[in-house]
Amino acid sequence: MYIPIPDLKQAQNVLVVSPHPDDAEIAAGGTIALLAEKGAKITYAMVTDGAKGGLEPGFSEAQVAAIRRAEQEQAGKVLGVADIIWLGFQDTEVPKPETVREPLISLIREVQPDFVISLDPWLPYEAHPDHRRASMAAVEACLFAGLPMIQPEDMEHGLVPWQVTGIALALSLKPNTFIGIDATWEKKLEAIKCHRSQFPGPTWDMFYPLILAKSREYGSNANARVGEAFKVLTTTHLHVMVDTWEA
Ligand SMILES: [Zn+2]
């Protein structure tokens, strides 16, 4: 591979694109907390409010959305997130990436992140359309945010084209970057547990061993007890590059 992989640990200004409340904490909460502790500014772009993620019948979508927004705000505080931008797309009905990337391109130009963290849109067995579309939109937005001919109306509103240094894709089949999160593991667990509506006792009891086993596996690649894994790429990797699968 001829293009160097940027160092996620050096990130100073991070935009996290999450399909639903809780995805960012599960996939990257330890790394987000680690970067925030080192002084990085963290902004979340929350693609949906998770209004259809209620586990108990009898709640309206508006009620579930209000609960999940509050849970996400609380989880963000635990990790040191500076700002959460709610994009307002409908849970389970996130539209095609061409639509979702529009507000993301504007947001990248406004926030001017060096790194964007999202999920890997090329995870082969990911069945949730919101995850596939939101993460693909994040990647496409990174590819286009630096091009002045794309959404020129942004520039009329005072924004400038912005090229990110790196894109870190969590939940990847082909991770190339492992981050030890021993120091922030407890914060990550606390942040996930803020999403009480998604992880009532029995659900958490089932989920915790899974997350622990995977975190230990990733940690062993980073000389740590627990870790997180990312496929970190540049935008150059993401167009006409046949080696990117192995990058
Ligand atoms: Zn999700």
Image (tube, rainbow, N blue to C red):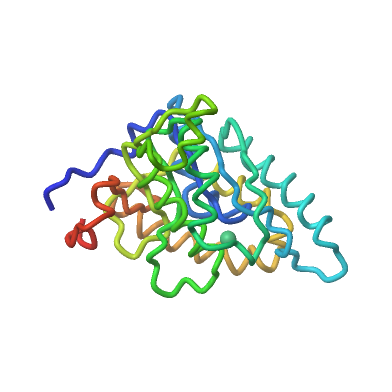
Which residue, as the protein is rendered here, is positioned at the far right?
A: 58
Residue 84, compared with residue 168, is above or below; it is: above
Q: Residue farthest to the left?
A: 2
Which is nearer the eye, 39 or 169? Answer: 169
| Vertical arrangement, residue 192 with respect to residue 130, above or below | above
Nearest to the observer: residue 207 or residue 152: 152
Q: Residue at x 60, y 62 (%)?
A: 94
Residue 71: image location, x then y, percent? 71, 47
Q: Nearer the viewer, residue 237 or 119?
A: 237
Task: Name the residue: 37% across, 48% down.
Answer: 168
Q: Is residue 140 above or below residue 131?
A: above
Q: In the rendered image of this protein, does residue 201 appear above or below residue 49?
A: below
Q: With 183 as the anchor, is 80 left or right in this view?
A: right
Looking at the rendered structure, the number of numbered marks drawn on it comes to 0
Q: As drawn, is 36 to the left or to the right of 198?
A: left
Q: Residue 228 location, x and y as percent?
A: 40, 51
Quadrant of the rendered image holding ligand 1: bottom right
Looking at the image, residue 176 sits to the left or right of residue 225; the answer is: left
Residue at (64, 63) in percent of width and height: 204
Residue displayed at 54% across by 28% down: 157
Q: Quadrant of residue 242?
A: bottom left
In the rendered image, residue 216, in percent from the top left (x then y), is placed at 39, 57
Residue 32 screen position, x and y as percent = 48, 40
The quadrant of the image that shows the C terminus is bottom left
